[in-house]
Amino acid sequence: MRVEQATVIVVGGGPGGSSTAHYLAKNGIDVLILEKATYPRDKTCGDGLTPRTVVELVRMGLPMREDEGWVRNYGIRGSGAGNFVEVPWPKLASQPNYGSGRRREVIDEELVRHAQASGARLMEGVTVTGAIRDGAGRVVGVTARENASKEEFEVHGQFVVDAGGVSARLATSIGREKDPKRPMGVAVRAYFRSPLATTTFMESQLELWAGKPGESEQLPGYAWIFAVGDGLVNVGLGSLSSTATPTGIDYRKVFNTWLENTPPEWELTPENQVGKVKSAALPMAFNRQPLYADGLALVGDAGGMVSPFNGEGIAYALAAGRVVADYLAQALVRDSAAERDAVMAGYVEDMRGELGGYYTLGRVFAWLIEKPAIMHACVKYGLPRKTLMKLVMKLLSDAYDRRGGDWMDRLITLATKVVPRA
Ligand SMILES: Cc1cc2nc3c(=O)[nH]c(=O)nc-3n(C[C@H](O)[C@H](O)[C@H](O)COP(=O)(O)OP(=O)(O)OC[C@H]3O[C@@H](n4cnc5c(N)ncnc54)[C@H](O)[C@@H]3O)c2cc1C
């Protein structure tokens, strides 16, 4: 059987995999991305890029030129229970005051090409089928298959990173299962041509109804409309469950009913729909742990890094790739497996230190808002209160300064520190 070599093997070329590979390659480390799809490849997503995501894209040096179709948004517009609020992104030391929206088919290819330009190697159309372990149980490579020729081969390396998304097949295959007690989201989305394509606010409808608004059963979740450039909007709705237990709700049906009840001037009609309605799951609050053990690190959705507050996962996948690459570079210059593992413990510690408390608060949030009555009361009495909404938006969008900042930032930081880490 053919055997390939790479110092670090990255499974999956989504944002998490590309970020990991970019930072490793910049460090002069030989890194190989194995991606089962071929680019451009789609990924079911809302395509919303908050300022926190922009921070990571800027760090990576990804060009984001407006004359190359990069749109900008300047805040969130929320509505529900007859109320309406517009909250601009806050001015922070740690984040710019704008976000963006870009189709994943486009940005994911830009990210992987960026990693290649930094020196990463890429094999597209290659599915990773399993882990290779040594006598001590350490992951020292992967088995893979060329999709076109069906040729099976092995790749041997010193570390493997599973950035293979929500299914995390590699991690699962060695027994690193997801925790069913952590929150899980399900979301549906479609693209439309719409006058809202020029909007500079991310639109959120904070109440979902099984039928006509106000006259039918209220469901847990919210709907969004994000401008993504090219005259298109990404329209979707998501539900949140505080555990991985399926809700039994037919979200595609809810989506269609919801679309029928949107204002006619938004023009979200079947004639204006571009492509199919697609749905996928969102793994939240570190639902797969440990993030590193036995030579295998988890990055992005594979490690359940989506925020339970808003369903955002790109920023965290990009950040995790940056952090893991830093620790991998240090681990690679150590001699023994024990020393390397001690270095890699820093990756777990940093990720949980940065996000563990925040995600624990998110788990409480998920538990509260899956009860429609609580969600309704929050929307009804909360939305009209401007200061409260500013605080809520900072919390939900992770748009707060962790060091310094205003009283709201300090309050959120304190809250994340007093709760146990996820
Ligand atoms: C409907 C929906 C809406 C969302 N909206 C937003 C949003 O607006 N903003 C936001 O920030 N986040 C959003 N998210 C979350 C976001 O999509 C994910 O958090 C993000 O894609 C995680 O990136 P990743 O690199 O970890 O995984 P992915 O983007 O899933 O990439 C994983 C890659 O691994 C590849 N792969 C998988 N298995 C294998 C294998 N065996 N061999 C080789 N390759 C493999 C896949 O083909 C894929 O390219 C949304 C998610 C959903 C489902």
Image (tube, rainbow, N blue to C red):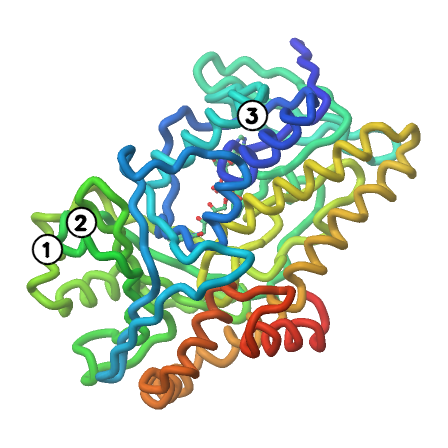
Residue annotated with mark 1:
269
Counting residues from the N terminus, which is met first, the one under dot 2 or under dot 3? 3
The quarter in which the N terminus is drawn is top right
Residue 263 vertical position relative to residue 55 in the rendered view, above or below? below
The quarter in which the C terminus is drawn is bottom right
Q: Which mark is residue 192?
A: 2
Residue annotated with mark 3:
34
Closer to us: mark 2 or mark 3?
2
Amino acid type shown at disc 3: Leu
Residue 389 vertical position relative to residue 334 in the rendered view, above or below? below
Residue at 65% x, 9% y: name it. Answer: 2
Q: Quadrant of residue 168?
A: top right
Amino acid type shown at disc 2: Phe
Disc 3, SS: strand
* Marks 1 and 3 in Cβ contact (< 8 Å): no
Residue 121 vertical position relative to residue 350 in the rendered view, above or below? above
